[in-house]
Image: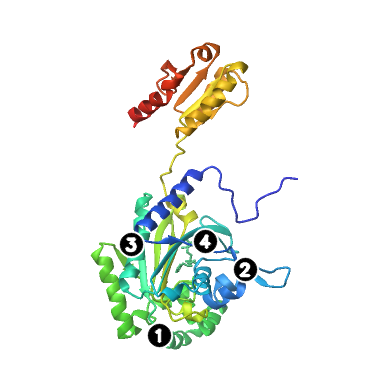
Amino acid sequence: MVYKLVKGTSDIIFNIENWRYLEEKAKELCSIYGYKEIRTPIIETAELYRRSVGQYTDIVSKEMYAFFDKAERFIALRPEGTAGVVRAYIENKIYSGNRITKWYYIGPMFRYERPQAGRSRQFHQFGVEVFNCSDPMLDAEIIALGMKYFDSIGLYDVKVELNSLGDVESRKKYIAALVSYFEKYEKSLNEDDRRRLQINPLRVLDSKDRKVKELLATAPKITSYLNEKSQTYFLKVLAYLDALDISYEVNPYLVRGLDYYQDTVFEFVASLGSNNKVCAIGGGGRYDKLVLQLGGPDVAGVGFGIGLERVLLSLTRSFLDKGITCYIIPLEEKVRLFCFKLLFLLRENNIRTDIAFENKKLKNNLKTALNLKAKFALIIGEEELREDAVQVKDLKTKIQEKVARTKLVSFLRVGLINEK
Ligand code: HAM
């Protein structure tokens, strides 16, 4: 019996260098922008997501991995990062310092979705969340951070789409107008959209139905319903983006699939690899009432989540495994102790080195060295042991020379510098 992966999950084995690169770049950039890392648990109470993401959203009502633990607590595997980070912010009373808190995280999320390219049941997000600051400059900062991130990994064709959902007051008025518009066409709506219109009307803007999409062309747009405060706020966000020369498209139908947003919402859009399907590789927005809603003080929040699987699918370049520097090949049993000590001497000097563990033919060991992408093979036989020396073979030029063990480290360093 061969055990198989759970559907919608994957092992990360062969492109691990790409993953590490994406993660390291995120960390590097976040530290430049003043964001600290936060790690929250993968399990949280299911109720946390119902209260924040929203009970009628697809994420909570259809896609959440939720179960009762042995003590009958209703637990969920996190479908997204924001709710857990907000819980941690409140539970640890981070707000008591009354400072701006800037956090980032990288980790797995879980949604029971139908797997396809760019959609899996376990996926990874790089996200940021910022608390206690309702300056539109910050909305622009995080959008810029996302774009800078894509730039730094060589993903240049990303577009920003954004919209404002307004504050509670603006949204109420807009929802009323939207409902009365669609009620006129109720008969043309399918059952799903009719239900959406009743329990969460903004979701209708997300409908995939062709007829609804047509109707949207003449439907009221949220941008015309923003009150002065929300409108001014949105215009300021746009002005800050303009100041950074970040191009964007205002998409009045962008509502996002999570309920906690208000004012600014945005998505990073790119085409996914070979099938060229254009989709969101990241998204985020403001959630100024979420901390309050989850039992904390009235503290503003804003953030984004970027799906790393989708980023990898969009990337056409790959970051190659750098390989090792040296591969030590002992030619006979009696030199192995000498080689073993040499292995650790080189590692102590930060030279990436490995050794041929088992006695094999020189030819086979040289092949292994090439597979490991080694730059040098260090070949040691009885003569080298006697002379306290090493045969250094440059695996690219094939030039081989004998080097005294005591000079080996500086010899290799010169070789590596020349190569650069
Ligand atoms: P989201 O739009 O649900 O937002 O997810 C963000 C990103 O996660 C998506 O744009 C996509 O790249 C990736 N993603 C989502 N579902 C899947 C999946 N099944 N397979 C692969 N990738 C997926 C959030 O999660 C919010 N928490 C973002 C946020 C942070 N808003 C404010 N702060």
Is the CB of the residue bearing disc 1 within 8 angstroms of ligand 1? Answer: no
State the image quarter where residue 248 is shown. bottom left
Q: Which mark is residue 144?
A: 3
Q: Which residue is mark 4?
A: 39
Q: Residues within 10 Å of mark 1 (few under 14, many from 20)?
A: many
Q: Residues within 10 Å of mark 4 (few under 14, many from 20)?
A: some
Q: Quote the CA–CA distance across marks 4 and 1.
A: 37 Å
Colour convention: rainbow
Labels 2, 4: front one: 4
* Disc 1 and disc 3 in contact, CB within 8 angstroms: no
In the displayed orientation, state which residue is furthest to the right.
1
Nearest the eye: 295 or 263: 295
Mark with earlier residue (3, 4): 4
Q: Which mark is residue 76?
A: 2
Q: Which mark is residue 174?
A: 1
Nearest the eye: 217 or 412: 412
Q: Quote the CA–CA distance across marks 2 and 4.
A: 17 Å
Q: Quote the CA–CA distance across marks 2 and 1.
A: 33 Å
Mark with earlier residue (1, 3): 3
Query: Which element type, helix, strand or loop, lies under badge 4?
Result: loop
Q: Percent position (x, y) of residue 166?
A: 37, 80
Labels 1, 3: front one: 3
- Amino acid bearing label 1: Tyr
Q: Write the residue at 52% across / 66% down.
A: 80
Q: Is residue 272 left or right of residue 341?
A: left
Query: Which element type, helix, strand or loop, lies under badge 1?
Result: helix
Mark with earlier residue (2, 3): 2
Q: Quote the CA–CA distance across marks 2 and 3.
A: 32 Å
Labels 2, 1: front one: 2
- Say if 261 sits above or below 141 in the image: below
